[in-house]
Amino acid sequence: MFITSSKNEIFNHSKKVKSQGKKVSLVPTMGALHQGHLELIKTAQQHSDEVIASIFINPTQFSANEDFNTYPKSLERDLELLNKTGCNAVFTPTEQEIYPNGKPEAKNIVPAEIANILCGNSRPHFFHGVWIVVSRLFEATEPNIAIFGEKDYQQLFAIKYMTRLKKLGIEIIGAPIIRESDGLAMSSRNAYLNEAEREIAPLLHKELKKISSNLKENTNYKQLIKNSKDYLLENGFDNIDYLEIRDSNNLEELNEYRDSARIFAAAFLGKTRLIDNIGTN
Ligand code: AMP
């Protein structure tokens, strides 16, 4: 497995592979890898000949009061897991390599209809920061394909939009959410949960499933959502950031059933913010 922190080296590596008529895919991550990340690598392998993973904790997508400094890191273990999974190359840039002229300001880039809803409402910088870093990772690797998890559905949506808008010619593939056996969506941030919180955490997915299975028969969406919010708050969650039903094709809020309906949630357990989403079919 080829490992480099250099933009030039990964660019040349990708160029060389493509010149052999092979397809290159990119799997961007922030490290602290779990099975969810490794499934993205496997999806990438199914769609391309050469898989490049990137590991970079991107400062522009964190605001000052968030967990940039404490975000879990396990580079050695990550490299071992990637190697075992058959990943071909890993790009592990420094902040200087990605932002040689300093960090750009993460605002006024992504259209408000995408950047200000759902996660963007409480994290107004987030999608601008993601847009910036993914642009740079795309420039550094010029992949044919890039894989993103549906766990961060709004992020996947934003990147698909960016790729279309900039006519990058990169195929964006979404991969399904990988969960623990009790339903909790895998996340590097799950490591922040203490034992008691970890027991409560799967209730989020349970409630999403409950809404999903009641959606077709129940037209009173507001009541369905209120019932689930109340249940989560009564059973240990500290705050519900959002719990909303939207159209998975355009992220418009829905008041009536459609096959494309998707339920999105973000909720706090102590200081840990969990996100999840689920389709209705
Ligand atoms: P992160 O390292 O958290 O920035 O995530 C890197 C990529 O892995 C993103 O495309 C995420 O959507 C994806 N990902 C993270 N957790 C999961 C999961 N449980 N299932 C599927 N994809 C995931």
Image (tube, helix red, strand yellow):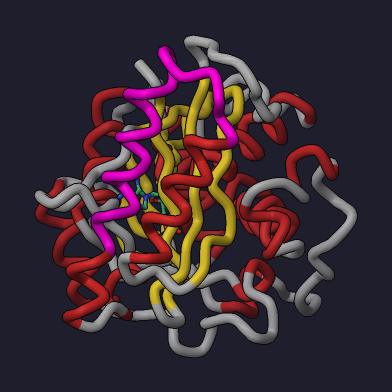
Does the magenta-highlighted stretch encompass residue 213? yes
> In the image shown, does 141 or 203 lie closer to the viewer?
203
Q: Is residue 46 above or below residue 6?
A: above
- The magenta stretch is 201-222
> In the image shown, does 164 or 127 lie closer to the viewer?
127
Residue plotted at (43% across, 14% down)? 216
Does the magenta-highlighted stretch encompass residue 11? no
Q: Residue furthest top?
A: 259
Res. 36 in view: yes
> In the image shown, does 161 or 187 lie closer to the viewer?
187
State which quarter of the image contains the C terminus. top left
> In the image shown, does 104 or 215 lie closer to the viewer?
215
- Locate residue 52, reporting x and y percent: 37, 47
Say how many tags the image has. 0
- Locate residue 155, reporting x and y percent: 58, 44
Q: In screen coordinates, is 198 left or right of 3?
A: left
State which quarter of the image contains the N terminus. bottom left
Residue plotted at (37% across, 55% down)? 231
Q: Residue 254 occupies which quadrant of the picture? A: top right
Q: Is residue 48 above or below residue 277?
A: above
Q: Residue furthest right?
A: 108
Q: Is residue 131 above or below residue 272?
A: above
Instruction: Give the main secondary structure of the magenta stretch.
Output: helix
- Locate residue 99, reporting x and y percent: 70, 72
Res. 28 in view: no
- Locate residue 115, reporting x and y percent: 75, 48
Residue plotted at (80% across, 38% down)? 113
